Amino acid sequence: MKSSTFAQVLSLITILIACKKTPDPPIVSTKVEFSAVIIDTVKATWAITSSAILTLGQTPIIDHGFCWGTNPLPDLSSSFSSQGAVTEPREFSYYLSELIPQTIYYIRSYARTTQVIYYSDQLDFTTVELLLPAVSTSIVTHATSSSAKCGGVVSSDGNGIVSSRGVCWNISGNPTLSNALGISSDGSGTGTYLSEVTNLIPQTNYFIAAYVTNEKGTSYGTIKSFTTPLPCGQLTLLYEGQEYNTVMIGAQCWFKENLNVGSRVDGGQNQDPTNSIIEKYCFNNDEANCDTYGGLYQWDELMRNSSVPGTQGICPDGWHIPSVDDWTILTDFLGGELVAGTKLKSTTGWFDNGNGTNISGFTGLPNGNRGNDGNFNDLTKLAYFWSSSEAGASEAWNSKLHFDSETVTSYNSFKTNGFAVRCLQDD
């Protein structure tokens, strides 16, 4: 009896186990699935497209990409990109080039396995009209006897690809790529660029224009003209009614005289850098001393409220207030600060026969200074020259020549002192 009952229970358990539902296996896609193809940018000769593989299917994908053409349902017999194997869902994009302007194109993404090629739904787009690009010519700067700087701004690619840009120049007018004496090549694409204009002849009038080229052709900016000056050393400048000679020392072109511009103010008052008038001190409030030694300037006045080393300040266009680094280049070229002073000093005018050799041609005169207390000091004994480099909120660096020494010494002094200024030509 017990044996029969046990058999019945065992049979019931077996039936219950057999009737328990087996879990459904996970659903696995048997094919590749894509997101929609998107055209991110459309131009006349190019476009950017993107898509995504959402599911991989059961067979490894050995290549994927886009196929496109002017006929519907493009496939791998049309133009296509090959973007490699895929091991997980991913987004991908491509740059379509060499398209025909104003043409309808059809595009699909694809994924290729060893057995089959899958394609996404089709998208069509139309390329736009190809136009000439647009460029404007920048102003000409840094003109020397043999070179200058110019450039341009490419404001439109004309719906194509800007393959080249630059400036071209000649002496006959209306410069183009076909009649230019010189052409610069300054990269590609839109935006601002700077051009080096080289191999120029002194005292010659040049015409210059920016150019830009795409598949449609070449466009030009407004024609500008400029005249190359004489070389440094032969060059003289008329600035604010005063004539200045120049001297080449090493690779630097310096004024040969101290700057003497502006209206004289009394030594007992501070100069006002916020007004539009350049103000100067003359030693002992005597205009004749400005004629001989140049003006004396407070630092904020000569910098015109700038604090940038190498700024133009009160110098003419194309020239700047020398920085500490500029003064170091000068003294290093002359053998260093310990001996450069004699080479920079004039051959006459220094106290107690402390004259220099002036083999540099700099002709440094003992201009003295206006102290920050309003008094004038050291005429014929010392020469003080401002740099454009700050040494703190209230001080700036200067270079000094001495009647009793061969040296050039660098000091940081209160900006309210009145020192001389020499202008240095821009690079």
Image: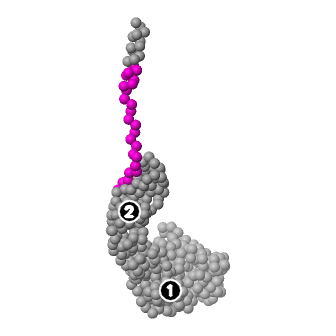
> Residue 258 or 96: which is nearer the viewer?
96
Q: Which residues are magenta?
A: 13-36
Which element type, helix, strand or loop, lies under badge 2? loop
As drawn, 288 above or below 73: below
Question: Does label 2 or label 1 sit earlier along the sequence?
Answer: 2
Q: Give the percent coordinates (x, y) of residue 223.
A: 40, 86
The residue positioned 53% from the left and 78% from the top of the image is 322
> Residue 240 or 349: which is nearer the viewer?
240
Q: According to the image, label 1 marks what residue? A: 182
Please state which amino acid type lies under the numbered disc 1.
Answer: Gly
234 horizontally vs 407: left or right: left
Q: Give the percent coordinates (x, y) of residue 118.
A: 40, 54
Please state which amino acid type lies under the numbered disc 2.
Answer: Pro
Q: Main secondary structure of the magenta part?
A: loop
The residue positioned 57% from the left and 89% from the top of the image is 233
As drawn, 359 above or below 83: below
Q: Give the percent coordinates (x, y) of residue 193.
A: 45, 76
Residue 74 is tagged as 2
> Residue 283 or 410: which is nearer the viewer?
410
407 horizontally vs 27: left or right: right
Q: Quadrant of the N terminus?
A: top left
Instruction: Tell whether position 3 is magenta.
Output: no
